[in-house]
Image (spheres, rainbow, N blue to C red):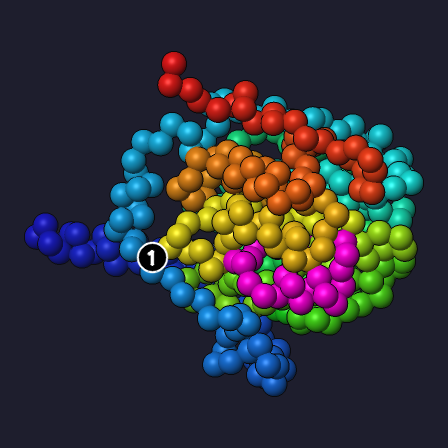
Amino acid sequence: MIMIILAALVVVVLITGLFYLNLSPHFGQRPSKAQIAEFEILSNYKNGKFQNLSTIEMDIKFGKTLREYMKKAPNRNPAKDLEVVLIDSATLADRKPEKPLITWFGHSAFLLEMDGKKILIDPMLGRRPAPYPMPGPKRYSNELPISAEQLPYIDAVILSHDHYDHLDYGTIQKIKGKVGHFFTPLGVGNHLIYWGVDPEKITELNWWESIEWETFTLVSAPARHFSGRGMFDRETTLWCSWIIQGSEHKIFFSGDSGFDEHFKKIGKEYGPFDFAMMECGQYNEDWKYLHMMPEETVQAAIDVKADLVMPIHWGGFTLALHDWTDPVDRAVKKAAELNMPITTPRIGESFEIGGLEYPEENWWVEYTKTNE
């Protein structure tokens, strides 16, 4: 009888899970048959999946990794909630800086103000990078510099891929009515359409495709990563990095990427860059081909010929086993060794691109646990 009850419970859980996977909007929408037919003629698409330029090898031992996650690690999270620099919504709405202005929201989310336009990059502004109500790591800060509801009109949103820590259903629901246009890699627009975004406001690009928009040239460039929001949609949408070229300045956004030769090609074809936002965090030797080590982050900035680099993909959530400050500590150290200018702003702190000064404070030290 006990076995029958347990089996029935397992069946109920499985059925409930399947219903949730199929009915919850958080998982988005997979590409249609017509889109898949178009993808099949592309060189970076094979057997129903998008492909990386280089082979991805992983040797994840799930049992070992799970045990590591369960161990107590005092510095895997900050010692206290991070304080952020708050942004006034009215001031932000009226602000039109002469030089490009960057504001970090933690992790990989940014506001870029450039050429009179406001551009949100990977705007994950939710509390947890997971489909509600599933559990996920809590954001390090109790608040954001400005909430999604308080944001003014946004001229464009640029997305690198569809993982939960970069594309957030709740955030899109709150901002979709005040965004002029969305730029995404192939297939990601389906999620947006499913969530109520007008298809006319979405442009999807393959690697090396570009589009002229206002005073900008936007180029979708390769990254070494993967995609997927559910159990059965891995690599069915594309992932990418972005080249954002304005009237006078050029910026590189790496998205999520392991280290590879594509950085040198980007530097050769489109460099130099005034500023590079480079993935640095949530890495592990078991998945080193999907996320760069901090030392590789600095080398990648050199490869794309950046004048200034900012380590990103940290400072928001704990998604790996390393100490939460390990990414920035290692990147700063390596940047000093290689004479690569590096900036480390606080969350919410705005700074100019192309200026003589940029944030260099080791602000995270005050949030780190000690053995005292």
Q: Residue furthest left?
A: 1
The magenta stretch is 253-273
Q: Nearer the viewer, residue 58 or 27?
A: 58
> Residue placed at 89% from the left, 46% from the top?
116
Residue 132 place in picture, x, y as percent: 49, 45
Q: Nearer the viewer, residue 244 or 188?
A: 244
Q: Quadrant of residue 242?
A: bottom right
Q: Which residue position holds label 1?
A: 60
Q: Is residue 254 magenta?
A: yes
> Residue placed at 72% from the left, 55% from the top?
305
| Neighbours of disc 1 within 10 Å: few (<14), some (14-19), many (20+) | few
Can residue 326 be seen in this snapshot?
yes
Residue 258 place in picture, x, y as percent: 52, 58
Q: Nearer the viewer, residue 361 or 181?
A: 361
> Residue placed at 53% from the left, 35% from the top?
329
Q: Nearer the viewer, residue 133 or 308?
A: 308
> Residue placed at 88% from the left, 36% from the top?
95
Can residue 153 be seen in this snapshot?
no
**Which quarter of the rendered picture does the C terminus lie within?**
top left
Q: Is residue 346 magenta?
A: no
Residue 3 place in picture, x, y as percent: 11, 54
